[in-house]
Image (tube, rainbow, N blue to C red):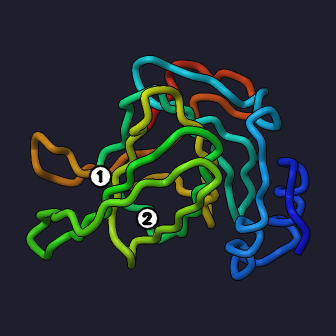
Amino acid sequence: MKPIFTLNELISALSQSSKDNYKTIFKNLVLEKNVLDEYLNWSTKKYVRNGIYKSDNFELILLCWEAGQETPIHCHSGEECWMYLIEGEIEEVQYQKHENGDVEPKGIRKIANQQQAYINDAIGLHKLKNNSKGRTISLHLYAKPIESCSYFDEQSKTFIKKNLSYDTYKGEILSSKRVSSI
């Protein structure tokens, strides 16, 4: 398979393929930040979920992170997730969920520019954090799209189900009522 340099090439390759080939397609990504300029949106309050494309089979989301921003510990509702780091550094902490509902860290890794990561619920839960001193940009492929997921609330020590939405979609800012991140 030849390298993929644009979002249109990526969407086309994913649309013409099955989930079995998504790993190979993602491994051939050579995306530069300037290809994503129209999708870059930032917030000092939380990381921003910028929806790029969504079909019945997959969705592409560009996450824009200010320094120190992070997700809570969360699942992927039975779906698969591939991540490609465009710029910056992400720290991923993976967790195991015990029968009693407790969570325990089971591994930490750093993901740097142009590196990739993969997770599904069989691997475990995880938490992502922009660990760099500046901004970080990561592209996420979910197969199938994730409409809701459960996240671990650190204060109550319980899992809470949350409906997911985008902050922007195809470069357009959505109303504040629909803005939601885990």
Q: How many marks?
A: 2
Q: Position of residue 180 (x, y in %)?
A: 46, 33
Q: Secondary structure at mark 1?
A: loop
Q: Which residue is at a point 52% across and 53% down the rendered structure image?
A: 147
| On screen, residue 157 above or below 75 | above
Label 2: which residue?
77
The N terminus, quarter of image: bottom right
| On screen, residue 109 above or below 106 | above
Q: Which residue is at a point 66% across and 21% down the rendered structure image?
A: 173
Q: Which residue is at a point 54% across and 56% down the rendered structure image?
A: 146
Q: Nearer the viewer, residue 45 or 131?
A: 131
Q: Amino acid at mark 1?
A: Ile
Q: Position of residue 50 (x, y in %)?
A: 63, 35
At label 1, counting other C-alpha atoms closer than 10 Å, the crowd grade (few under 14, some 14-19, many 20 or more) is many
The C terminus, quarter of image: top left
At label 2, counting other C-alpha atoms closer than 10 Å, the crowd grade (few under 14, some 14-19, many 20 or more) is some
Identify the image quadrant of residue 51: top right
Q: Secondary structure at mark 2?
A: loop
Discs 2/1, front: 1
Q: Label for residue 81?
A: none
Label 1: which residue?
73
Q: Position of residue 36 (x, y in %)?
A: 76, 35
Q: Which residue is at a point 77% across and 59% down the rendered structure image?
A: 29
| On screen, residue 180 above or below 158 | above
Q: Position of residue 164 (x, y in %)?
A: 48, 44
- Image side of residue 46 versus residue 178, left or right: left
Q: Nearer the viewer, residue 182 or 45?
A: 45
Q: Could you tell me how far apart the alpha carbons at marks 2 and 1 are, in whole angstroms?
A: 13 Å
Identify the image quadrant of residue 150: bottom left
Q: Amino acid at mark 2?
A: Ser
- Image side of residue 124 versus residue 56, left or right: left
| On screen, residue 180 above or below 116 | above
